[in-house]
Amino acid sequence: MKKLLAAVVLAIALPAQAATLRWAAQNDILTFDPHSQNHATTLAMLMHVYEGLTRYGKKYEIEPALATSWKQLSPTQWRFNLRRNVKFHDGTPFTADDVIFSFGRIQQPQGTLQVYVAGVNEIRKVDDHTVDFILAGPDPVLLRKIIDFRIMSKAWAEKNRAQNVQDAKAKDETYASRNANGTGAYILKGWEPDKRLVFAANPAWWDKNEGNVTDVIYTPIKSDATRVSALLAGDVDLVTDLPTQDVARLKQNPSLRMLEGHEVRTIFIGLDQHNNELQYSDVKGKNPFKDVRVRRALNLAVDRDAIKRVTMRGLSIPAAIMVAPGVHGHTTELDKVSGADPAAARKLIAEAGYPNGFEFTLDCPNNRYVNDEEICQALVGMWAKAGLRVKLNAIPFSTHIPKILKHDTSAYMLGWGVATFDSLYSLQSLVRTKTTGADGSFNCGRMSDAKLDALIDAMKTEMDVKKRDAMIREALTRVRDEAFYVPLHHQLRPWAMKKNVTTLHRADDRPEARFARVD
Amino acid sequence: MRASIRRLWQHDLAWSLRRSPVTVIAAALTLLCIGGALFAPWIAPQNPFDPASLNLNEAFHRPGDAGYPLGSDDQGRDLFSTILYGARISLGVGLAAVLLALVLGVSLGLVSGYVGGRLDAFIMRVADVQLSFPAILIALLVDGVARVSLPSNMAGSVAIPVLIFSIGISGWVQYARTVRGLTLVEREKEYVQAARVIGRRPLAIMLAHVLPNVMGSVLVIATIHIATAIITEATLSFLGVGVPPTQPSLGTLIRVGNDFLFSGEWWITLFPGCALVILVLSINLLGDWLRDALNPKLR
């Protein structure tokens, strides 16, 4: 009897001991440097290893992470009490110095994550476990913003000469690009680019792991068909970007579980509105995209419903504005899409002085967003009906992103996910005139509008929710009506997993292994 | 006129062709493919390379739907038209690459065999080195290097020349080796010595006397090489480094269709695949027959 009991206890206890989550998605991360690339997949991996002062709970509410509590001493001074007895993976203790070091590091100009500390002038050390954030002005979204301000060990960075942020544009690499030392729930065991990435649970983590996953193996599988085959064959447990054409069939598979949900990501086309002559076009001496009529025509010619129905198989929400449902500031009334009208678009382009249309190159990633290349191909056809001759340059995302960040483009596709769930994040990164910091950090076409700049700067510090909402509304409307961008749609993102896997769907498209169970 | 037709009919090659029904079918299929590719603009109901003629709302028609005999793909392209235009690209790239390899290989082989000495040793060692790599690897390498060294925005417009160059470069060795061997034999024959004695220059001897005598074998290699080159192009395009998706070749079409296999849209990959098999198989059969027909020992 005793033996039997022991066996039963063992049988119940065993599954909880060790579980491996094999996760696959389309693209690989760009780097392991937590302050280099503002890229959703990269951040999704980084968050397992590096932590910020705050983090999201299950419902995107703010939770204490490396800070245990905070309080506002004045509108522009916040005091954070840091968690005690936290150790980095290499055993060095976490202190205020690491926060200050990371703050200096994230602000280096070659990185692209300054947006997460935008508006913070200085971080002052009060004692080893207390820091003060000194702000340029009041900040209504500070606690959400700093979630992706991740803390790196100062001693470790100095020992390995990784104080400088990796410069992706210069194709530079540092020790921190391939190695990691954070405080998070998982330890980086190894990363072979485009092959696999392995995490192991951190036994000394300060918090309790809600799931039972002790090892995570992430495999980027570019080909849609191969990724789905791997899931069906049981080679992977979780696929977070399903090919749209397979969703209906996978839903009916009894050995799989589907988790449906939307993603706070908007896919759009950006246009060079800075150069006086487009770099990749047959129009000489002027830039047609500076003309609002051309930009409106580009918007008008896109048949968003056809893209949704055919290319996305229903898994998208056609977009008229630059933020997705679920982001503070989005309303269905603003986000109303009008039908396509190629004839009217052709007329507008003729009015703007191009009766025979013109030619330009569209830069497009081919392995980042759901059906990115197919959407671009469809756009080429739709714009051709308005008289525009579009050359498609579809390249891997890792080549695409440095190219457009160098402004070496005339028109490009980009998708923007909103980590803070607030419109300011999108407006500041995409719409605000480009400066050296967070402002306009992904404004790759360098559009610039004084009125929008003023609005965005005002909403950064406006604490009155009503007034701020009105500003967001005005800004989103102006971006839409002046057609500064060509928004296409907001992505829906079902996840598929084996029946024995449970996890939490995340609208920011960042699966967290700490919430996952493999039974 | 009549006499010349009769002479052609009674020629060795024609006789051998008449005797092999498989070859006749292969020849007919090859002609059909070439004809379809050549006259695509007049046969095809749609020009799939013109983005303005595409309509996303017409995507995923099943084979047999009105106006879409073989169905349509994810961009609303009529598959029948797209296969005809794709075969044009596949055949064009294949022929051009073979021509490049042939000119390069034959001239190097002639020079190598006729001149001999250090030059011969050098050319043959280069050939040996290249032979130790699979041709597809060389093509991938050349293609990759060319893509990186050319400005990235030109990728679309230079894709086809780059493809031709990389496939051509990877295939010259077999021509060079064959021609060199034959040249070594021909060089010692009396007619060549006679030409040398009357004072003809080496280049003239190579072109006027040696070349015509080695061309038979070269033609056999070239025929089979066309099939290989088409497959190489299809492989590169299938891997996504070939022609741009807006101007799909057969390989690109198979790649695109591959993504829809699981969701039940089998025709997007099946029909281009069949077209590729028919094209390559019939050219290969023709090449095999030509090799046997030109081999005096088998006559």
Image (tube, coloured by chain):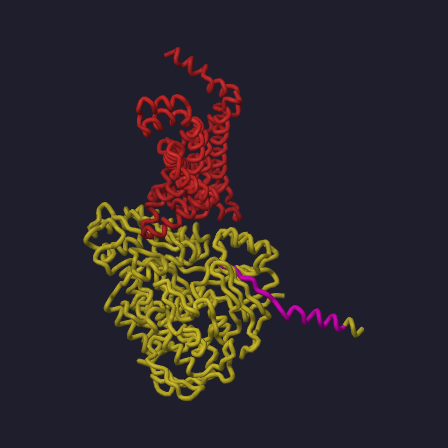
Chain colours: A yellow, B red
**Residue A395 locus on image (x, y percent):** 38, 53
The total of numbered circles placed on residues is 0
Foreground residue, A408 or A346? A408
Looking at the image, the residue that sits furthest to the front is B197
Looking at the image, the residue that sits furthest to the right is A1
Asked which quadrant contains residue A256, the reply is bottom right
Foreground residue, B252 or B114? B114
> Which residue corresponds to the image point at 36% horizontal and 60% vertical from the top-left?
A401
Foreground residue, A77 or A407? A407
Asked which quadrant contains residue A73, the reply is bottom left
Residue A5 located left or right of residue A16: right
**Residue B118 locus on image (x, y percent):** 39, 39
**Residue B43 locus on image (x, y percent):** 38, 31
> Which residue corresponds to the image point at 49% horizontal and 76% vertical from the top-left?
A183
A10 drawn magenta: yes
> Which residue corresponds to the image point at 45% horizontal and 67% vertical from the top-left?
A32
A79 drawn magenta: no
Whether A160 is drawn above or below B55: the answer is below
**Residue B239 locus on image (x, y percent):** 45, 47
Q: Which residues are magenta?
A: A5-25
> Which residue corresponds to the image point at 51% horizontal and 25% vertical from the top-left?
B292
Residue B67 visible in rendering: no
Quadrant location, the N terminus of chain A: bottom right
Secondary structure, magenta segment, majority class: helix
